[in-house]
């Protein structure tokens, strides 16, 4: 048997040395007495009949029953009468409380140990909630099923639950491994063997098994998925025959019995993308804890630190917190290192393998685990599964139907087969008002591999790209379904960003240049509306080289306009944006419809005034005003009025700006253009501030912030802008403590969007009013550099703020010192600027 130390009461039993100690002193114990005590301890979960004990302690030897009684009496004299309990007419049971069972040799049963006995598991990490939930469910339900994908940790959880429930099942807890049982007819015999029963060769083996199960027993049936119908029939028979029986099943698919309480396991918790370098936050997640613990077991000196935290988190996220995949990844760290494992994840099906020789065959490689699950599908399910591999980051029902359906499998077949895949734990269902589905990333890699083997890769990627084009073509949707506002159109499409990106990248790399350009042009307005400016610009730069002499000029013009629009906050300088808009405008003036021209000239007016070219701004506004007189464009009048208001602000005419913004509100509300509406609200508050109506401005800012907090469309850039504009107004009012509080509130939003350097002028004014003059001038220099990078000029209000900062500094410092600080501030990067703000304003 395995080398084990059992501790109870005042005694210790060491199986390696076959030694019993009481109060630390060795006790002379005969060989049969030692064997009897060890057998009773190892089978402490259940009652052992006299004949069983005789067979185990005196194998193949005929002895009298009184030999057993003699050895039991001897043990009781040493250990106390409570140590071995006699159940008259039935048998014996170990009765002492076992304090510890240490197993240095590993968790596997040794030769001769009953295969059904629950063996201690390594510490279970990341399942604290389930270790409370599952025992509670078993108290309420006679059949509980742990469901989930292969490798998600169902068996480990079932073992841990069984160990926790030992005191509640005095007649035994039995683990029955079914993975190697391939014949449904052999199922009752497999269960009986685990329970150390011999069933007759003839008759109803299930009925015989049901008749022999007595007492309060927990039966753990592990890996039921390949025999689901047979297991369901046997479990129903057993539960009906034995009212005190409880069953805990692990499976990829529910047994679908009345009274069954299924619990679908999620993967272990993984840190979010913002936790790449946050040690404490990362270590608190189950996936990271498991990975680190398994690496430590192989490399005792390993620790999670600042040098490897980002790579560990990336591994855990890429493997979706799937416990088996994390075990495999940890096993490769001694050979490849953490960063090497991270770099090889693209080849995970080849790289991730187990070094354990005693692991089940299906769990020795990541591919073998997936092969096991895949083999449980029928051919139609396999086709749907592999085709779903083209989706990245999840998918809705309608896109899945569009991509997967073919002549043999219509969209309703896809619905049914998708449901089957969810039931079989091959697809994850994310419930909601509009349910979404996804493949765990490792399963998706496997599905793509199957797709290539089936020769369907290019066809399915092309179908996926066409699906994304149809999904994001708002104008086509409006023509087909009728008018819908931007706020109605956007929410269902926001979860598809990963799919859109994937389609663009594939089309660009696969030579589908026209399709790639179409997708990017459709993405421009979408990326602007959801505030992902930098990413949108990157997509457009990616496909820009695909433009050639054969590209239609309207396609090129749309790309130029998109770069200018999304580039406002995406790093494209104003002079370049003006050049792009001029090129797009020249094309749109030659081609109807006129709506793209109106958008272009309004954008041109806005960028021109930001660049300081008020003449061009006014010329563009006049053209835009004329366009809005056309009946077909009357609904877009709000865009012209918004641009008018911004030009008026640049001209330092706040009254005219307020009138324009206020007049724009009704049409922008009607269009459901949430982002433009936000900018209108924010600028109305700014204009109130410029007019000196500080109380009204602060109330307007507070109302805007409440709207942002309640809106599902709010992004980090919108919150950062609103909060820092509010800080400016609070600073002018003299509410410096509240202004500091709002700066603290803005920090996470700034970090995820524009950065603090974008608002350095506002923060400089706050620092100056607090008497932190050096820091204020440094921030003013940082603001100088930000405007230079953007190719923009300050609005009159921002000019006055800068003048106030410099005037306060000049009261205490010489001009040359101020000039030096300002130049020094212009060289600050984002991290230095944030550190300066944290030191001066927070």
Image: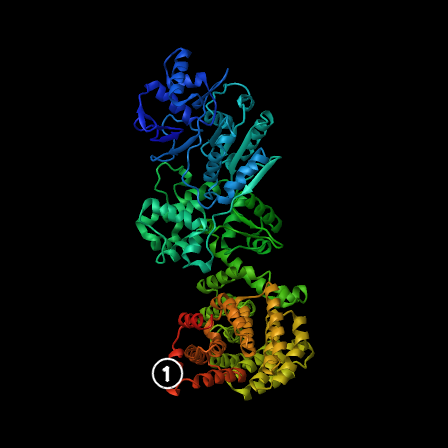
**Which quadrant: the N terminus?**
top left
Q: Closer to the camera, 840 or 796?
A: 840
Q: Pinpoint residue 340: horizontal percent, then vertical percent.
A: 34, 54
x and y percent of residue 115 in the render? 42, 28
Identity of the residue drawn at 38% across and 49% down: 292
What is the quadrant of residue 140 in the picture? Answer: top right
Q: Is residue 154 above or below residue 611?
A: above
Crowdedness of circle 1 by 10 Å Cα count: few (<14), some, many (20+)? few
The part of the image, by quadrant, that contains residue 36 is: top left
In this rendering, does residue 104 appear at all? yes
Q: Is residue 475 above or below residue 246?
A: below
Q: Position of residue 352 (x, y in %)?
A: 38, 47
Residue 247, image x and y in percent?
54, 32
**Which residue is more in the foreground, 90 or 179?**
90
* Total numbered labels: 1
Can residue 318 be seen here? The reply is no
Asked if residue 148 lies left or right of residue 627, the reply is: left
Secondary-structure class at tag 1: helix
What's the image's color scheme? Answer: rainbow
Q: Nearer the viewer, residue 438 or 55?
A: 55
Answer left or right for 149 relative to 72: right
**Mark 1 highlights which residue?**
820
Residue furthest out toward the right:
631
């Amino acid at each position: 048997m395995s080398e084990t130390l059992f501790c109870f009461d005042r005694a210790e039993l060491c199986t390696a040395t076959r030694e019993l100690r009481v109060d630390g002193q060795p006790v002379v114990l005969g060989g049969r007495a030692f064997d009897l005590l060890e057998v009773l301890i190892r089978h402490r979960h259940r009652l052992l009949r006299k004949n069983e004990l005789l067979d185990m302690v005196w194998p193949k030897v005929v002895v009298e029953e009184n030999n057993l009684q003699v050895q039991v009496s001897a043990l009781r004299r040493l250990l106390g009468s409570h140590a071995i309990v006699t159940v008259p007419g039935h048998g014996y049971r170990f009765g002492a409380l076992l304090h510890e069972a240490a197993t240095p040799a590993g968790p596997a049963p040794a030769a001769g140990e009953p295969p059904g006995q629950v063996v201690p598991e390594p510490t279970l990490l990341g399942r604290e909630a389930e270790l409370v939930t599952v025992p509670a469910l078993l108290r309420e339900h006679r059949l509980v099923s742990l469901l989930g994908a292969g490798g998600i940790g169902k068996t480990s959880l079932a073992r841990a639950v069984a160990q926790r429930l030992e005191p509640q099942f005095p007649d035994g807890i039995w683990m029955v491994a079914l993975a190697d049982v391939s014949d449904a007819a052999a199922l009752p015999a497999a269960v009986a063997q685990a329970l150390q029963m011999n069933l007759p060769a003839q008759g109803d083996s299930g009925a015989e098994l049901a008749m022999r199960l007595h007492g309060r027993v927990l039966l753990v049936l592990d890996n039921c998925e390949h025999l689901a119908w047979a297991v369901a029939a046997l479990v129903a028979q057993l539960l009906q025959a034995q009212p005190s029986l409880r069953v805990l099943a692990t499976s990829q698919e529910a047994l679908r019995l009345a009274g069954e309480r299924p619990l679908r396991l999620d993967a272990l918790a993984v840190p979010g993308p913002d936790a790449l370098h946050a040690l404490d936050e990362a270590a608190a997640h189950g996936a990271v804890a498991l990975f680190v613990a398994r690496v430590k077991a192989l490399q005792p000196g390993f620790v999670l630190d600042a040098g490897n935290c980002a790579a560990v988190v990336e591994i855990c996220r890429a493997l979706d917190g799937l416990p088996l995949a994390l075990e495999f990844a940890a096993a490769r760290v001694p050979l490849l290192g953490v960063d090497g494992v991270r770099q090889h994840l693209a080849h995970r099906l080849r790289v991730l393998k187990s070094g354990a020789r005693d692991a089940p065959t299906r769990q020795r490689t990541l591919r073998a685990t997936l092969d096991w699950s895949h083999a449980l599908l029928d051919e139609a399910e396999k086709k749907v599964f592999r085709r779903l591999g083209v989706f990245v980051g999840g998918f809705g029902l309608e896109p899945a139907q569009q991509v997967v359906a073919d002549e043999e499998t219509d969209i309703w077949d896809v619905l049914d087969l998708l449901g089957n895949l969810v039931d079989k734990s091959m697809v994850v269902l994310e419930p909601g008002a509009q349910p979404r589905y996804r493949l765990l990333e490792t399963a998706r890699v496997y599905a793509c591999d199957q797709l290539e083997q089936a020769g369907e890769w290019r066809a399915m990627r092309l179908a996926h790209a066409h699906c994304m084009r149809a999904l994001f073509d708002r104008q086509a949707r409006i023509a087909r379904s009728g008018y819908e506002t931007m706020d109605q159109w956007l929410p269902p499409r926001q979860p598809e960003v990963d799919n859109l990106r994937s389609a663009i990248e594939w089309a660009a790399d696969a030579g589908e240049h026209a399709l790639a350009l179409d997708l990017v042009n459709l993405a421009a307005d979408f990326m602007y509306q959801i505030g992902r400016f930098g990413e949108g610009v990157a997509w457009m730069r990616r496909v820009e080289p695909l433009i050639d002499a054969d590209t239609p000029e309207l396609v090129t013009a749309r790309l130029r306009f998109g770069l200018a629009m999304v580039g406002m906050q995406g790093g494209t300088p104003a002079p370049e944006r003006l050049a792009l808009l001029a090129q797009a405008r020249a094309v749109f003036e030659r081609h109807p419809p006129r709506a793209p021209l109106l958008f272009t000239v309004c954008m041109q007016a806005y960028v021109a005034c930001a660049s300081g070219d008020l003449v061009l701004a006014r010329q563009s506004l006049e053209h835009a005003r004329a366009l809005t007189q056309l009946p077909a464009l009357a609904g877009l009048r709000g865009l012209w009025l918004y641009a008018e208001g911004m030009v008026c602000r640049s001209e330092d005419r706040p009254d005219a700006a307020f009138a324009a913004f206020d007049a724009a509100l009704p049409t922008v509300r009607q269009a459901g253009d949430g982002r433009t509406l936000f900018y209108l609200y924010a600028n109305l508050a700014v204009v109130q501030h410029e007019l000196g109506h500080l109380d009204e401005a602060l109330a307007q800012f507070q109302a805007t912030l409440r709207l942002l907090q309640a809106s599902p469309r709010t992004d980090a850039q919108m919150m950062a802008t609103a909060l820092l504009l509010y800080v400016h107004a609070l600073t002018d009012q003299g509410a410096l403590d509240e202004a500091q509080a709002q700066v603290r509130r803005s920090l996470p939003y700034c970090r995820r969007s524009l950065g603090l350097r974008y608002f350095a002028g506002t923060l400089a004014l706050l620092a100056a009013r607090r008497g932190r003059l050096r820091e204020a001038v440094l921030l003013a220099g940082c603001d100088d550099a930000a405007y230079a990078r953007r190719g923009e000029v300050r609005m009159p209000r921002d000019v006055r703020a800068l003048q106030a900062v410099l005037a306060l500094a000049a009261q205490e410092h010489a001009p040359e010192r101020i000039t030096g600080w300002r130049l020094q501030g212009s060289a600050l990067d984002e991290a230095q600027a944030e550190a300066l703000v944290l030191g001066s304003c927070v």
